[in-house]
Image (tube, grey):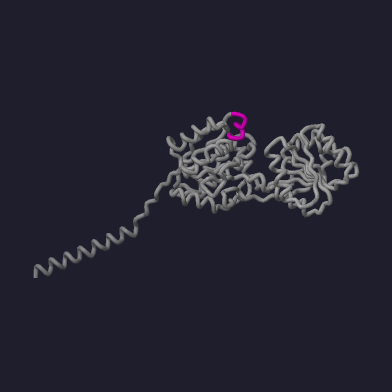
Amino acid sequence: MNKKILWGFVAVVVLVGAFFVFSNKQQVTPIVTKQSIKIGFMLPLTGQFGAIGEGVKNAGMMAVEDYNLSHPNVTVSIVNEDDGFDVKKGIPAYTKLTTIDKVSGIMMISTPIIDAIHEKMNADALPIVSIGLQNNGVAPDNIFQTTLAPIAPIEFMAKFVDSKNHNKTAVIYNNAFPATKSFYDAFIKNYTKQHVDFVVTDAQSANVAATKIMSSGFDSVVILEDAVGGPLVTKDLKILDTKNKLAYYYDLQLSTGWAEYKKLLGDTNKLNGAYALKIKGGDTSVFTQKYKAKYGTDPTPYAEYGYDSAMVLLNNYNANQKTWISNIQATSFVGPSGKITFDKDGVRLQETEMNEVENGSVSQ
């Protein structure tokens, strides 16, 4: 009898214990794992591009703050390194970030450095997001470019002009620089109509070209020039083209060299009706307001690309490097610099357009 009572008591204890164990399990709050990400900002913080590098760095820090607001359980640390836009300074900066600081990914700008050590970067396999162009070794790898490849807009421009069915087009370019020569090569490769080439490098060659164009039955002119040659030849053409017989087409240099055009032409309404190539960006109004409120000045050129480049790294983070890189390749979002997606080689795909100059303004 005593044994029965004892075993009955043990059974009750076991049942009660099991109940409390089960109840406690139901009430336990899962432990949230804190995640850490360390990223290097390798930028030209001194030298001729120091102001741009500083602006990109500031914008990148804004991105980190915004990311932290939506990811409170992630700790992001940034290591800033000055590469001076110089290979001799940039290689040690990269080595320090990867071997001493042991960052997981890098945001950068400097084209000379990325071209010099892209093979080393490929071997290290860290996600690299560059605002600057990569000229050497572009391939499906761990290096991504958040600015548009320079040839793509020229190809778009050529097809746009081609659709206008002009009879005789003058193509003006400067062969003194590899970049402008490559723009010319890309244009004529995609332009099927009759054209004649004119090389303009100074005021004299601009005057000669303008005179020949106006006396030889041309109905259109394409200007693939720098911010010096373009305004010079335009000024001479406008003096001779009093009845506006020519259709004018400009690459991105019309926007970047606008001040020089205004200086030489006096009245930029003379450009009304011309078409200018433009990269379709995003809405920077909110970004500009936040940047100015935080740093007391307007954003520097490419600052919005710094914000978006940092977000490309952060929003796609994965502790596994291969997965992180794969996530970046598939990224698609709209930031201050516009929509960001990448082609198979990790180069940004961005919309371009040809805008007509109206009321003396190239901005639309």
User: In x, y percent, where is residue 284?
Assistant: 65, 44
Is residue 189 at all visible to an observer of this figure?
yes
Magenta-colored span:
47-53
User: Magenta stretch: residue 183 in it?
Assistant: no
- The extreme left residue here reads 1
x 29%, y 61%: residue: 22
User: Magenta stretch: residue 50 in it?
Assistant: yes
Residue 200 located left or right of residue 101: right
User: In x, y percent, where is residue 252?
Assistant: 72, 42
Is residue 82 at all visible to an observer of this figure?
no
| Residue toward you, 26 or 142 | 142
User: In x, y percent, where is residue 231?
Assistant: 79, 36
x 69%, y 36%: residue: 177
- The extreme right residue here reads 243
| Residue toward you, 206 or 67 | 206
Tell me how many marks there are.
0
